[in-house]
Amino acid sequence: MLRGLFTLAALVIGLLPLLSAAARYPSYGTLQTTTSSGVLNVVINNTYSTINLFDLHVQSDLANLIETLQANDTDIRVVVFSSANKQFFIGHIDVEYFLPGYASPLPLYDPGFPDMLFPVALLWNITQLPQATIAVVEGRTRGIGNEFLMSCDMRFASTAPSVLFAQLETSLGVNPGAGGGMYLSRLIGRGRAFEYVLSSADVDARTAARVGWVNRAFDSPRALHQYVQALAARIALFPAAGIIATKAGINAVSRPAREVIVKEAQDVIAALIGTPAVQGAFERFIRVTNNQSIGPVELNYGEEVGRLFA
Amino acid sequence: MLRGLFTLAALVIGLLPLLSAAARYPSYGTLQTTTSSGVLNVVINNTYSTINLFDLHVQSDLANLIETLQANDTDIRVVVFSSANKQFFIGHIDVEYFLPGYASPLPLYDPGFPDMLFPVALLWNITQLPQATIAVVEGRTRGIGNEFLMSCDMRFASTAPSVLFAQLETSLGVNPGAGGGMYLSRLIGRGRAFEYVLSSADVDARTAARVGWVNRAFDSPRALHQYVQALAARIALFPAAGIIATKAGINAVSRPAREVIVKEAQDVIAALIGTPAVQGAFERFIRVTNNQSIGPVELNYGEEVGRLFA
Amino acid sequence: MLRGLFTLAALVIGLLPLLSAAARYPSYGTLQTTTSSGVLNVVINNTYSTINLFDLHVQSDLANLIETLQANDTDIRVVVFSSANKQFFIGHIDVEYFLPGYASPLPLYDPGFPDMLFPVALLWNITQLPQATIAVVEGRTRGIGNEFLMSCDMRFASTAPSVLFAQLETSLGVNPGAGGGMYLSRLIGRGRAFEYVLSSADVDARTAARVGWVNRAFDSPRALHQYVQALAARIALFPAAGIIATKAGINAVSRPAREVIVKEAQDVIAALIGTPAVQGAFERFIRVTNNQSIGPVELNYGEEVGRLFA
């Protein structure tokens, strides 16, 4: 998708990929990688943000990582995403991005899919990586963070109280723009998708496992990581061609169509973002979250959402 | 959809909408409404029927209500449907409607969707209201009553023994004509949809919650209503545009397509209804239910279905 | 679909259908049938194989049975599949079929669907039988055996340790070629379908019931059979036209499209089978399973899959 582009983007942001000594794969500023027998472990760690914000650093690094993975369908057969921040697996999008005067060094639309906004194409590309993708969730994940989670093949979580899942867009007057509500409906059914997305609720890990938001929840981090590492190692035994073929088949019936995501999620949010109501909501959001930093609202958005309307 | 039409229909049926003193919304003969901070509470109460029959009174009143709601996408952001009849949340369709000689004052096809039968379009229109819609189920709901339930965004139920869910059409030689089996497959999966619809079984609330037919079941009516009122009040805080956008996105991937409902549900039942087998089944149904009134068969159809074939 | 063809096939294989004295339906070499008030009970018993292999005997007999059922949409309204082999409800495909030099007496493509391989069309035809179809699972079912299970309307299982469900294709470098991963995603959701299919795991009956792979699991074989016989007898009371109409409606939204199965499952595996990697995997599979016979690998493939790569 992004050949040639991210060299420039990385220069602009100042995050040139670093080659890890131990790994065959590069690490990036916000993504540390290690490899082990066909498994790439990626630890998300946005040190620019206390809430692991899905900001331009993360977007740029993920895009670079994905471009590398797209070209590698043999050595690496499984990718496992975890987080260094145990309070926030991965944050929501940087809302400042949508306020007037913000100039992004990243392209607005994706060079590979000119009808897709850059982060929307990024998540779409994750769904069709040639590797099996697994998310190991410790900490909160909301908004596009949860859409990132949906773009992985599988999701496993710890039952720690810090684990909370949410699509919070409706509370801000918009919709999940990368298709989060659509993917959710394929995991938890139409009725529960409406409930949780329309109410912008925080869902805990046990509930998430019961309804299918995550595959399974584990009461100890050790059990969680052991299960995922064993699962990853097992899949990594198998020939890449079978993984690719199996993923394509399941995607063909269970993934929302690209055109539907573009027209019924992305273009809808794009048309709403500039309205005064949403601009006002975003400004209040930045204020009550103390500019999207760790604090009562980011920690407990589900309970504190009323502050937006106080 | 129905502008201008229902004035006539209401005149014919004699159910002119009455303006409730306390409410900003009108009540209708079978639907009492009250409003509270962006939430419209609608109590279904068909006093013409002991089983809250989904008859022409209810159809006409619902159509009027929906027409009003369609034009209001700002003041009212959530609609909650409950029932005054604790034995029957809402009944099945009035089977007499399909017997020879019955002349309905309602149009056969919907003026807004000329390929859709009036009640089928009615339910379709509910799925795309600009408001979030929630059903609070105390009592039985079968046939088109359950299809009405499916057309709401979310469903919550009491675990009282009087709560039973069924698509009973197969037992009468037809199919759920407004897409009930299709919606169910999006909530409970393909395999369980086949089981419950083909067997025309009564499903209790705990089972319904476990498989996803309803979002959740509560052991006390108070807990049920408290949960739903809190959920409704929360969603009603949010801007209308976000609710509309989020609903459209989830509908785009999880709602059966309109054309599929028309061709594979509605037109199929329409072709079957006039056959001697179905006419005979409807006549027996009216007989064993004592003309669709409260009694052993309407109360326990799941167990008493054999009486149709005795 | 197959008119005129199977007389020849049966002659070639030497399995001319035998008329059972007690039954109105013929039995076949690997399928014993009995009828009871509109229910056809089919016991799968491939005595040519210790693992009830889905080989050409079974394929031919099933195709004959289905052809007969397709023409009978009135007397028989429910078909119940069970197994005489309590270790293997039905086996995976005969892998030898894909090795060089194997000459099948069956046509490669289906006469009724010239773009579908014979066994793929066979399973597709099961999904649209005019009868309700129920599988009663005691024993393992993997690969195309599980795809056969998916092609039935409903599935019930015993919780005996011998009951294990798997799509094992990925471990062999291919994909479920008759759409098993696609159907699974409609039963257990996208995330769990990825987990179980990509890992080629053995899933036990309790897990299968919890996630929706089967409708329900029973702790005793007697309870299992009693439930299914009662369910079948109930559905068999109902008019055939309603069963057909209800099935068509649910299929219209929950069954993977025929073209998608052909292009994204069948044609993908067909392109992979001849590759050296897959041919090698199949040869190793035959070796470690002692030519697909009962033994540690066929009994515990989920745990023994590593032997393929030793």
Image (tube, coloured by chain):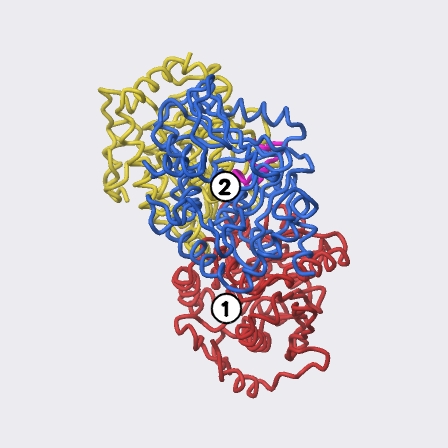
Chain colours: A red, B yellow, C blue
Residue A125, disc: 1
- Residue A101 location, x and y as percent? 48, 80
- Residue B119 location, x and y as percent? 32, 35
Tag 1 secondary structure: helix
Which image quarter is the C terminus of chain B in?
A: top left
Three-letter amino acid code at disc 2? Phe
Three-letter amino acid code at disc 1? Asn
Which image quarter is the N terminus of chain B in?
A: top left
- Residue B237 makes an appearance in the image: no
Instruction: Name the one closer to the observer, C220 or B196.
Output: C220
**Residue depicted at 67% across the width and 74% down the height:** A33
Span of residues in magenta = B205-221
- Quadrant location of residue C125? top left
- Residue A125 location, x and y as percent? 50, 68
Chain label for disc 1: A
**Residue A206 placement, left or right of C101:** right
Tag 2 secondary structure: helix
Chain label for disc 2: C
Magenta stretch: includes residue C119: no
- Using the numbered discs, state the Cα–Cα distance from disc 2 to disc 1 in whole angstroms: 33 Å
Instruction: Name the one closer to the observer, A24 or B135.
Output: A24
**Residue depicted at 49% across the width and 83% down the height:** A5
**Residue C129 placement, left or right of C83:** left
**Residue C50 placement, left or right of C310:** left
Q: Nearer the viewer, mark 2 or mark 1?
A: 2
